[in-house]
Image (tube, grey):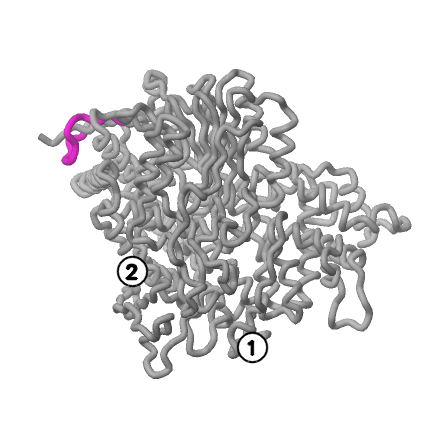
Amino acid sequence: MKLLFRWLLRLATVLVVLAGAAALLAYYLASRSLPDYDQTLRVEGIAAPVEIVRDTADVPHILGETDPDVFFGLGYAHAQDRLWQMTVMRRTVQGRLSEVFGPRSLATDRLMRRLDLHRLARQSLAAQDDYTKAALRAYAAGVNARLDEINERALGRGAPEMFIFNAPIAPWQAADSIALAKLMAFRATGQMSNEILRARTALALDDPARLADLMPDAPGEGLAALPDYASLFNSLPRHAELDSRAVDKAGGDFLSPLAPPVLAGASNGWSAAPSRSAAGGALLANDPHLALSAPSIWYLARLELGTGGVIGATIPGIPVVLSGRSGRLGWGITSAYLDDQDLFIEELNPDNPEEYRTPEGYKPFESRPSIIEIRGEKPVTLTLRWSENGPVLPRDLRGLAAITPRGHVMTLGWTGLDPEDTSLSAAMAVMRARSTKEAIRAGERHVAPAQNLQLADADGVAMKMIGAAPRRAPAHQTEGRLPSPGWRKENRWPGTLPYADNPEFLDPSGGIVGNTNNKTVDRPFPDHVSYLWGDSQRIERWKHLMQRREVHTRESFIEAQLDTVSFTARSLLPLIGADLWFTEKAAPEGTLERRRQTALRLLSEWNGDMNEHMPEPLIYAAWLRALQDRLIRDELGPLADDFTHVEPLFIERVFRDIDGASAWCNVRHSARTETCSEMARLALDDALIWIGEHHGTTLESLRWGDAHLALQDHPVLGEVPLLRHFVNIRQSTGGGDNTLQRGVTLGSGPAPFRNVHAAGYRGVYDFADPDSSVFVISTGQSGHFLSGHYDDLSELWRRGEYVPMSLDLELARAGSVGTTRLLPSK
């Protein structure tokens, strides 16, 4: 027995030693790819020395004698800190994820191959202006200089992920940056997904008129009646297979760029003219909203260009400051929600499915094969087909099969598919503009995604929608809200509208202009801009905060950016609880009735602040979620699962009985007629039962932040059991779906209130004292989880703090964490 024990002890010791050795080896290999910020390196591709000074927040300040050399330095810095992120994004847009990740990413590869964004990017390169071409080539050379350094010095393959996934890195090309810009444009729009969901819902409803309740228009002028979707195609049955669980969604892929409309691009941006500034200088605040991840999609940088220094937010792989400031101009972006996508139903030739119907008769698709290599499996060959309206989409995308008649296919029309897309040239010109008017002129070359360009200079403020707006005929059958027959001339796009027609607000008399993705203009179709808007609630709170002060300061703009008061809660709770407040007899302790009374008491005293430390936001959010589900589940069945987030206008329409919307309160399959007050009470009970099962029954001790945990997860390693504790960043956060400090919830699963979509970048620019401007991102600058800069900014972001956004080079040098000097090889 002693002998056996000795051998077991020896074996255990050996195993522990081997495990320790393996851990040390893994750490050594992973740490090899940590960049050295303090070195001198000779590289090819620059004409003169380039200096990269990293300040205490690890923000690179890049200096060179020419602008191409500065962009070279940016490419090198991006590759130092975010190489894995850049290469995964490039593989995504190329449709080559399955080569690395296997079958799990095949749905995304199929979609991206069909959209063909990388080929379009290569074509778009020729359309850029000379300055942008030179910048793109120099940037690519900078990325490749880092790749050469990694190969020559055996620097751990460039990123720890490279040891887990065999993902050879091809040299960076100038067109790759354009492709990544197109990928971000596709991520930022939800118009296609909204059209699909609208069509599926129209088929599911017995009364199509009720569609206007569940998917309402933003307040404003009414809409002329649209045709019933089923009536457009006789072969489309009502109540077709609409079960969301039976649909193969590309959006379910862990790296998919396709998101539901509520998780598409969003943002806040506003500016105040000197007349509304306490210090006499213009102010601008901007916080774009995208899906949270670790590392953040954003990367802070300063570039010293020939026109002067610029500093702000970049996206690794794209050599431009998308939101930031120079010494003269501040600029930011908010999603404009322009309806720049249409779905077209193409009728196939029954005698030849390789032809489709056009106004002039049947024509052949533009077709070519495309092979997708899949790790561990046989390759798959696709046939990519394009009509005159756009690429043919896969039938299983978002449930397209249920809304596509037999003998037809669905194609996508999108301005971002323009092979002469000059959006990057426009962004370069905005970055170098010296005034709001010059920046507006520069925006004319922007194509997609449509953005509201927020501007401020020494003299005033402005906002201009930039992006190509499709021209639609007044007789368009669905006004771009539903898929339409692609062979009908009145449904096709004859071109785009003039840039001058895009909404513009230049030096408004009130001195303040802003956007929270709300409806900006009220025009009749086809000049309407959009029927789908990202916000009808945050804008109300923004107006209140802006107008309650005669003049503003940097601090008041920060306060508004971090505001967590929900206008939605303040407006809806009095409606849905109108017959419930203090109307019941006291109930025994421990009963559901007693908890309901406690919940109603707490909510009656609540001011609508979605503070992370309070219980009321969780009670409110769970109640509204349960209420919407009760209202629609009876009508939609499993399709109700696609309505993952509460639509405030729908709840308001129902409880105010606008156009008979209270009909949603009645359960069709019950004998009696239910009232809206009953549904509100039953939904509150549902919510309290759910809260009790997941968060406890003591309502006063609940914390919204425990449910509203920000998920900044590594998109690849975040699921690995041990590594996830090192790579994922989880934080308690306030705010919600409809607050200015927006933290959009997951909306499904056992933890539906997790914060998954928020302002990954915040910036406030003050032109009374430009170097007092501030900015921050939600994680850290580095994408290497062993780096101290992987998450060092995340706690500042969570607390609502910022770092200095200064162009003072001496200040950057004084607190430098390292200086990299790149010297010409010759």
Q: Residue furthest bottom?
A: 351
* Label 1 crowd bin: few (<14), some (14–19), many (20+), radius 10 Å: some
Q: How many marks?
A: 2
| Relative side of 705 to 528, left or right | right
User: Looking at the image, which is closer to me, 62 or 694?
Assistant: 62
Residue at 65% x, 71% y: name it.
206
Quarter of the figure with the C terminus: top left
Q: Which residue position is annotated with label 2?
A: 99
Dots 1, 2 in contact, CB < 8 A? no
* Displayed quadrant of residue 598: top right
User: Looking at the image, which is closer to me, 263 or 474?
Assistant: 474
| Relative side of 682 to 91, left or right | right
The answer to whether residue 724 shows anywhere in this view is: yes
The answer to whether residue 150 shows anywhere in this view is: no
Which amino acid type is marked by label 1?
Pro
Q: Residue furthest right?
A: 585
User: In the structure shown, which secondary structural element does the residue marked by tag 2 occupy?
Assistant: helix
Q: Which residue position is annotated with label 1?
A: 237
Residue at 51% x, 72% y: name it.
402
Q: Position of residue 687 (x, y in %)?
A: 71, 54
Which amino acid type is marked by label 2?
Glu
Which contiguous range is marked in magenta? 41-52
